[in-house]
Amino acid sequence: AINITNNWTLNAVAYGNGTFVAVGVYGNAYTSTGGITWTPRPMGNGEALKDVIYAENMFVTVGTGGGIFTSPDGIAWTRRHYDYGKTFTHVVYGNGVFFANGYGGLRSTSTDGINWSTIYLGYGNNLYSVCFAKSMFVASGYRHFYYSSDGVNWNEANLDGNPAADHIVYGNSHSDKDEVLEYTLKVIEEDKA
């Protein structure tokens, strides 16, 4: 998390269409074209925004109150989903699908970022983190990893030793969490064969 002004904590940053967007507590968003000077873009909803991405020519942010918001520029935001008492923690995009997850087994998908279909799987089905890699969504739960090609139908990956990861990413970096994800992807490929 980073702090910009007023000691408001920001939780995530995304880049798209020449603009950085950072989101955080109290429904605060900030935009920057260079990453040095930031302009406040208060959304006025008071909700803690947990994650933001840029995909399909729009920013998508998720947070408390079951909030999902979209913006073409990071300045003007439109609420797309609301569910008081629920919290989305992550949002990703892949295979033409937006996928958001949160506490209480909260999961939501959208093919356009505008209309969302949401299900609740209960607190034993929390996903801590999700990413899109090698044409599939990969998610971590408490000592469980799951994979899906569409964000709706999920399979559990059978991993030796039940490794845990509270945040997973895929890219050119190398860390212990990346090694767990690489191992997970290898096991998934073997399971699918």
Image: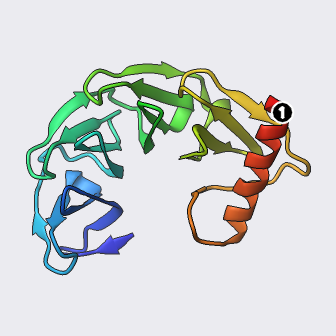
Q: Which residue is drawn at the image coordinates 18% and 62% (left, top)?
A: 18
Q: Which residue is drawn at the image coordinates 63% and 55% (left, top)?
A: 166
The secondary structure type at the circle numbered 1 is helix
Residue 76 is drawn in which quadrant?
A: top left
Residue 14 position in % (x across, y down): 32, 58
Q: Quadrant of the C terminus?
A: top right
Color style of the picture:
rainbow
Q: Which residue is drawn at the image coordinates 29% and 75% (left, top)?
A: 3
User: Among all residues in the image, which is located at the extreme bottom?
Assistant: 36
143 left or right of 60?
right
| Number of on-image labels | 1
12 in relation to 46, above or below: below
Name which residue type carries label 1: Asp
Label 1 belongs to which residue? 191
Residue 176 position in % (x across, y down): 72, 69
Residue 83 is drawn in which quadrant?
A: top left
Residue 107 position in % (x across, y down): 49, 29
156 left or right of 175?
right
Residue 64 position in % (x across, y down): 35, 41
Q: Quadrant of the N terminus?
A: bottom left
102 in relation to 176, above or below: above
Q: Which residue is drawn at the image coordinates 34% and 73% (left, top)?
A: 2
